[in-house]
Amino acid sequence: MKTKELKLIIEEGEGYFIEFKEKPAHIDREMVAFANGSGGRIFIGISDSGKIKGIVVTNQLKSQIQDIANNCDPPIKIKLQELASLLVVHVNQGTEKPYSCSSGFYTRIGPNAQKMNRNQIIEFFQSEGRIRFEELMNLKFNFQNDFDPQKLSHFLSLAEISPVLDTRSILLNLGVAEQPAGNLIFNNTGIFFFARDLDQFYPHAGITCALYKGIEKVHVLDRKDFNQDIIYNVDNTMLFLRQHIPVRYEFDGSPKRIEVPQVPLEALREAVINAVCHRYYFEKGANVMVEIFDDRIEISSPGGLVKGLLEKDFGKKSVLRNPKIAGLFHRIGYIEKMGTGIRRMQNLMKEAGHAPIRFEFTTFVTAVFDRGVALEKKRHPVNLNEGLNEGLNEGLKSLLAVISQNPGIQTRRASALLDNRSGKTLEKQIQTLVGKDLIEHRGSKKTGGYFLKG
């Protein structure tokens, strides 16, 4: 370090990465704070006001400071540098956080080392991944009353695992439960997958799906909240997306039409599963959100990037926040290969002629899918086979087009897309199309909708 650089540091004063100390008293707190933060330098021989007081640098002083670093828990690696009448202690960001000294846990807040209270220590452990929500045991979950054996059977079927062992042994082998003193205790991963009603235990673990009119969160046309179990949540989210994403039909010479969704469903599915696998479950004030706008689809996961993963490495390196959850999804084929999902999603969008997925990083990680509406209209000004339109008036044609673009659509939604066409008129037109064998109603009267027939 040159004199010019030292002068500049003194002029700028203490900060997040810089600490001045006249003597090495309580230097262990500063070391711990820097190790728990992003690292920093301690200048011994400078007063808090930035005045150089100087200190006699001896081997005894160096050994004393090294011993202090070694006595932290875990030991902190430091580097000592003599600079004129000063001693500079370089502390790197720790790789085994959290660190503590004899007086407790400290972190760097601005230019100060601040002792952490109980809640801050808990939050620190959580944010550093030392405590994983998925691994915590829940004593309130009762095996006899709250476990759903049918969900386990469904999981085993998807994973192609033969149920040759008894239920308890299977759950123990899957790593979703433990059996101390003969009692089967579930961890949160087991509850996420096999609870009879997940919402009873973790309301924040669900997925909220919403369809908006326009490009802002103003007019909600449809909303669904799914939180029965983690597999059910993903599957029903995909049904919601299928219901509201337009589909065009292509013909390859065979009698069967080929459905081509406006946005690749496999890319959306990958994003939904990523959002579920990587979300920060200690955050209980938000759900995974899947939101459909006229021009885009946004899939958001609470918690921001996983600790240790930089924005520039997103999609290139894989850091799992919830490896148990991801592992079980992998076993049932919902995740093909760890760490390849982002690249596969981008490739699917590129093959479909869409702009790349845009990722936004805040306290959420949000994947934004461009629906390419303008491009779609330019390429396919008529989304229906012209033969289907023969003999229909304009009202029937427009209704048929809406059903084609929104498989499973319900009457209320169709009315909104057709400039609030009256229910009586719409019902009459629907019956006409049903009578012409062009559309059909599938599902229950309450939750079902209309599809093109064929």
Image (cartoon, rainbow, N blue to C red):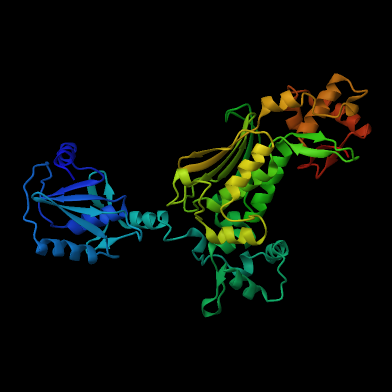
Locate the C terminus and report the quarter of the image it occupies. Answer: top right
Residue shown at 30%/65% (left/top)? 74
Residue shown at 74%/31% (left/top)? 412
Front-most of residues 176 and 23: 23
Quadrant assignment, res 374:
top right
279 sits left or right of 369 in the view: left
Question: Residue at the top extreme?
Answer: 394
Looking at the image, how many numbered discs can be counted on the residues? Answer: 0
Residue shown at 72%/25% (left/top)? 377
134 sits left or right of 258 in the view: left
Q: Is residue 267 visible?
A: yes
- Residue 96, horizontal then vertical, whole percent: 35, 61
- Residue 226, horizontal then vertical, whole percent: 64, 48
Question: Residue at the front extreme?
Answer: 2
- Residue 263, horizontal then vertical, whole percent: 68, 37
Q: Is residue 229 visible?
A: no
Q: Using the image, determine if residue 188 lies above or below residue 51.
A: below
Q: Using the image, determine if residue 341 lies above or below residue 7.
A: below
Q: Using the image, determine if residue 432 lies above or below residue 448.
A: above
Residue shown at 53%/59% (left/top)? 323
7 sits left or right of 250 in the view: left
222 sits left or right of 410 in the view: left
Front-most of residues 139 and 364: 364
- Residue 404, horizontal then vertical, whole percent: 80, 32
Locate the N terminus and report the quarter of the image it occupies. Answer: top left
Front-most of residues 358 and 161: 358
